[in-house]
Image (spheres, rainbow, N blue to C red):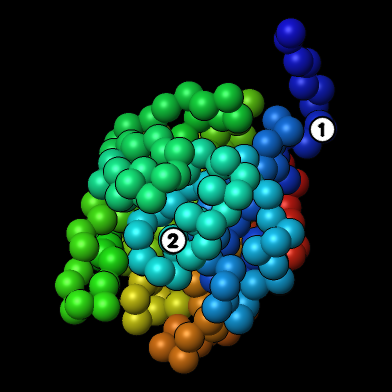
């Protein structure tokens, strides 16, 4: 069957759910980024109300991995993550698809490409061990000519320009919390580098270390269109 898309049709509905939780609804599928719901004081979601077909993880830190294992097992969700993290999750009985930075893959809901992120990643056990969980990433999700970029956790880096040049981005989610990631000033420059049509701040106010006024980030933007989304609000592309 061939689906015609008219101009003005909604291709993706993209919702922000606090911290780095982003939901994309496209082609009848629900795709959830970094589903940190339990213990996330910024989210409007309840674990029992979410039914993701697909979960995409930027990295393995607890505030991104979140409720992935429970959700994936309950709903037979496909979990897309870097190769090490996806192997680690497959050992827990989760259906996974491993990728690496720079690689793209065509899924039935769209094309996913992992990009660089400057950050750490690891799972800390009760025995004071840290399990390495691969390279942290940003994620490009492309469907029918629309592109959403989820930057994951990262500091500012110059190759965000390259990502923006290679991929016209309609909507970018950028961390602004500082301390663990870019702060508002660096995130504003990241927005400029990416040349995204719209940018939305994420990864702030969840913990005392990342308290920020997201409107200050919007004020710092130079020529980019920025919007603060309240948890539960969405943008249609
Ligand atoms: Ni992190
Ligand atoms: Mn984080």
> Which numbered disc covers residue 75?
none
Residue at figure coordinates x 73%, y 53% from the top left: 235
> Which numbered disc covers residue 65?
2
Quick one: SS at disc 2? helix
Quick one: SS at disc 1? loop
**In terms of depth relative to the viewer, which is nearer, 2 or 157?**
2
Residue at figure coordinates x 34%, y 37% from the top left: 98
Instruction: Give the crowd class for mark 2: few <14, some 14-19, many >=20 residues within 10 Å.
Output: many
Q: Position of residue 132 (x, y in %)?
A: 20, 59
- Which numbered disc, 2 or 1, marks the residue that appears first in the sequence? 1
Residue at figure coordinates x 36%, y 72% from the top left: 181
**In terms of depth relative to the viewer, which is nearer, 71 or 219?**
71
- Where is residue 105, by image quadrant? top left
Residue at figure coordinates x 42%, y 38% from the top left: 96
Q: How many marks?
A: 2
Examine the rendered structure and indicate whether residue 139 appears above or below residue 103: below
Direction top: furthest residue: 1
The C terminus, quarter of image:
top right
Q: Position of residue 159 (x, y in %)?
A: 29, 49
Which residue is labeled 1 in the image? Answer: 8
Image side of residue 224 versus residue 160, left or right: right
**In terms of depth relative to the viewer, which is nearer, 225 or 172?**
172
| Pointer 2 with pointer 1, Cβ within 8 A | no
**Mark 2 or 1: the one toward you:** 2
Q: Position of residue 214 (x, y in %)?
A: 58, 78
Examine the rendered structure and indicate whether residue 77 appears above or below residue 2: below
Q: CA distance from mark 2 to mark 1?
A: 35 Å
Query: Is residue 134 at least partly visible in the picture?
Result: yes
């Amino acid at each position: 069957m061939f689906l015609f898309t008219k101009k003005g049709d909604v291709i993706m509905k993209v919702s922000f759910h606090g911290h780095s939780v982003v939901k994309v609804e496209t082609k009848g599928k629900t795709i959830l980024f970094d589903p940190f719901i339990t213990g996330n004081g910024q989210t409007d979601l309840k674990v029992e109300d979410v039914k993701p077909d697909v979960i995409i993880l930027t990295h393995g830190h607890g505030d991104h991995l979140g409720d992935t294992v429970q959700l994936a097992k309950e709903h037979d969700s496909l979990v897309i993550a870097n190769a090490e993290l996806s192997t680690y999750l497959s050992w827990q009985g989760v259906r996974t698809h491993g990728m690496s930075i720079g690689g793209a893959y065509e899924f039935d809901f769209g094309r996913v490409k992992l990009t660089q992120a400057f950050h750490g990643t690891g799972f800390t056990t009760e025995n004071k061990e840290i399990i390495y969980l691969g390279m942290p990433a940003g994620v490009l999700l492309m469907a029918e000519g629309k592109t959403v970029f989820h930057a994951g956790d990262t500091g500012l880096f110059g190759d965000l320009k390259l990502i923006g040049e290679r991929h016209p981005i309609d909507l970018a989610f950028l961390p602004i919390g500082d301390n663990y990631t870019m702060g508002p000033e660096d995130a504003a420059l990241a927005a400029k580098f990416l040349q995204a049509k719209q940018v939305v701040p994420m990864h702030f106010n969840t913990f005392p270390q990342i308290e920020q006024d997201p409107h200050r980030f919007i004020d710092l933007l130079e020529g980019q269109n920025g919007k603060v989304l309240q948890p539960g609000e969405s943008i249609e592309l």
